[in-house]
Amino acid sequence: MSTDSTSTEISPSGAVPARALHADLVGARIDWGLAAGVGKRLSRPGPKMTSYTRDAARAELADAAVRAEGPVREVTGLADGLAVPTARVLERDEWIDAAALSMRSMLSGALDDADPSPGLSGRIGGLQASGLLAFLSSAILGQYDPFSAGPEGADDPGVLMLVLPNIVGVERSLKVVPSDFRLWVCLHEVTHRVQFSANPWLRDYMLDNIAVLTSETGESVGELAGRVTDMLRGDKPREKGVIGAMQLLQSPEQYDALNRMLMLGTLLEGHADHVMDAVGPAQVPTVASIRAAFDKRRTGPRNPVQRIIRALIGMDAKLAQYIRGKAFVDEVVSTVGMDRFNTIWTSAETMPLPDEIDEPAKWIARVL
């Protein structure tokens, strides 16, 4: 997933199968219909455009998503011969509807099992989620969603989404060539689609870890407090910020699942950024100026409210995923080549471990 400041996707042995995650554990606690409805009312309007400009941008983005497929497949060596799907070019309110549906599906395991009457707690959760959806609806440029049905229905999982007003807004802000910027964004998002279509096990891998993260630990309040106290007093190193807080509050099994999710997300984002830059010079004439302007924007200063929101929803951690992940992929590919790098997509066991992301030679030694 691309944001203008910045897709994360897990069947490790012993993990609870995603289909066993009953809706009443997580999905039914949030009224996603309410979340989408309020989120759309809270969402800010996009940049002003004439109908002609909007229609032209929509057509160009749809075309760019198709044109990006060939170069991405050639560079990655993935998804060769598979059909080229149609991307969805969305307005902000349409993205909110799609995101709410995807989250409900992902967290409930299956839409048909979700409780249609989530109750008071579900409505409270929906109101909380609405603010997040509204905020993200103006930040996300594109997203590959592996949990929603594609154009061909249930037998075609996954859909590529591009948020038109956000892409137009950023290209205007950066003063870049619109056609080049649109293709550049599509190269990143199409790489995510190719990652999942070429490696279908990734979707179940993610769902299995989400099942662990959302399962009930069975701990009493006293047991939780005791475990947190022991961790605070112990010598075991802990992460900083939001991740450190989650490490304290989660069971060891849940924190391991979180780490697997983070490592996969780092790999996926870094791989997409690597491919985007590898393909860019041949396909996007102004790629150097786009990359410089985009990186300056997403690492630039923010006002205090933006900094708080970014920290709470993990957008700064997301940015770190791009940087660490791309450095990992760059080094491995330059050392062993893309064909041998693609061993990484074999199984959960070939995914990079936390200490290997920053020291790619360790991954090469262990896996290759």
Image (cartoon, rainbow, N blue to C red):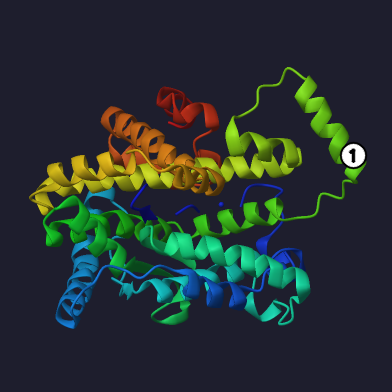
Q: Give the side of residue 176 with respect to residue 58, left or right.
A: left
- Residue 3 lies, with reference to residue 82, above or below; the image says above
- Residue 109 lies, with reference to residue 242, above or below; the image says below
Residue at x 59% of width, y 30% of height: 240
Q: Give the side of residue 102 with respect to residue 92, left or right.
A: right
> Disc 1 on helix, strand or loop?
helix
Write down the quadrant of residue 192 in the picture.
Answer: bottom left
User: Mark 1 = which residue?
Assistant: 223
Residue at x 66% of width, y 81% of height: 112
The residue lying toward the viewer, choosing from 334 and 128, is 128
Q: Can residue 337 be seen by looking at this rendering?
A: yes
Q: Give the amino acid at mark 1.
A: Glu
Q: Can residue 71 be seen by looking at this rendering?
A: no
Residue at x 68% of width, y 65% of height: 125
- Quarter in which the N terminus is drawn: bottom left
Q: Position of residue 91 (x, y in %)?
A: 35, 74
Residue at x 19% of width, y 80% of height: 55
